[in-house]
Amino acid sequence: SGDRVLMVQLISYNKRQRMLLTRDVTQIEKLETTRRDFVANVSHELRTPLTVLAGFLETLIEMPADALPQAQRDQYLRTMHEQAQRMQAIVADLLTLSTLESSPTTDPQPVGMPGLIRTALSQAEALSNGRHTLSSEIDPHLDVLGSGSELSSAISNLLINAVRYTPDGGKVTVRWHTEADGSARYSVTDTGIGIAAHHLPRLTERFYRVDRGRSRESGGTGLGLAIAKHIAMRHGAELEITSEVGRGSCFSLHFPRTRLTDGDRP
Ligand code: ADP
């Protein structure tokens, strides 16, 4: 009936006595569909680079060594290396996700957010290579309790996406500050390609991408936001996204007051 899935069981005790059992298995069915989709997605994501890799290898094996100019041979090897790295990145992100899902949260410690953000900024600067204007407003005394390695990965995922999805000449601004209600926000605002509203609710699903080709080209695994969302959840924080096509996006991690280190709380 509608979107619900019911399991119906008719049990006969004898000719006259019967019992009809119904169970609502909607949730179980949904979980099963998610699991099936996930396995299909992983297979698909890994199959593409593997096919390219196997194809080039076959050519190299079958062609006599002197029939292939050195330059072309080098090009083949570079492509093969890129595909192998792509698979490595996907597997590494999958492992990160599964660890996040299965391991208990660690003892919360002050993580040194300003330092983590500055490190992420220098990675983003290297990636941008002068093609964007990166700026930051960081409260040097504001810190949260949690896991430094997890937060640094969420911080840089958002920042690297901003660089990836912003055309040359664009701006990326990073902020780390307290809000009027005493909560804290790490935000990354870009003047990039933006995202249509109907994509927003699905953006943190594994392997969900607005533009598959563009994401692949830029080296994305399609798992960065799924990872960032998990990390946010483990810190009692929210991953908030606002965006406008052609104008840019703002991705932020919003931490409740209770997550700030004692020194930050009034
Ligand atoms: P990917 O590895 O593909 O970047 P993510 O999970 O990090 O995977 O992001 C999912 C999708 O969200 C991306 O493929 C892209 O379409 C969109 N996206 C993420 N960040 C931005 C951004 N700053 N601007 C525009 N689109 C973005």
Image (cartoon, rainbow, N blue to C red):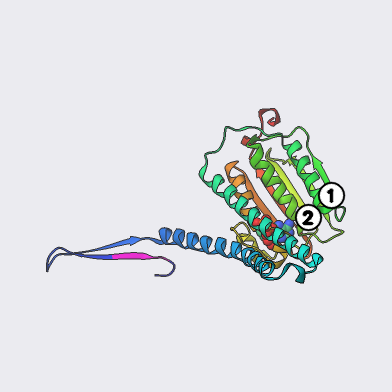
Residue type, numbered disc 1: Leu
Residue of label 1? 134
Whether the magenta-drawn stretch holds residue 76 is answered as: no
Q: Please name the residue shown 54% across and 48% down the image.
A: 98
Which badge, 2 or 1, is on the more N-terminal residue?
Answer: 1
- Whether the residues at callouts 2 and 1 have beta carbons within 8 Å, the answer is yes
Query: Label 2: how many residues lie within 10 Å, few (<14), some (14-19) or many (20+)?
Result: many
**Alpha carbon of mark 2 to alpha carbon of mark 1: how far?**
9 Å
Q: Which mark is residue 100?
A: none
Seen from the viewer's position, the closer of residues 147 and 56 is 56
Residue of label 2? 163
Query: How many numbered marks, from 0 up?
Result: 2
Query: Label 1: how many residues lie within 10 Å, few (<14), some (14-19) or many (20+)?
Result: some
Q: Which residues are magenta?
A: 4-8
Q: Please name the residue shown 82% across and 61% down the image.
A: 167
Q: Residue 114 appears at what percent x and percent y?
A: 75, 37
Name the quarter where the N terminus is drawn. bottom left
Locate residue 41 relative to residue 118 in the image: left or right.
left
Whether the magenta-drawn stretch holds residue 6 is answered as: yes
* Ligand 1 located in image quadrant: bottom right
Viewer can see residue 88: yes
Residue type, numbered disc 2: Val
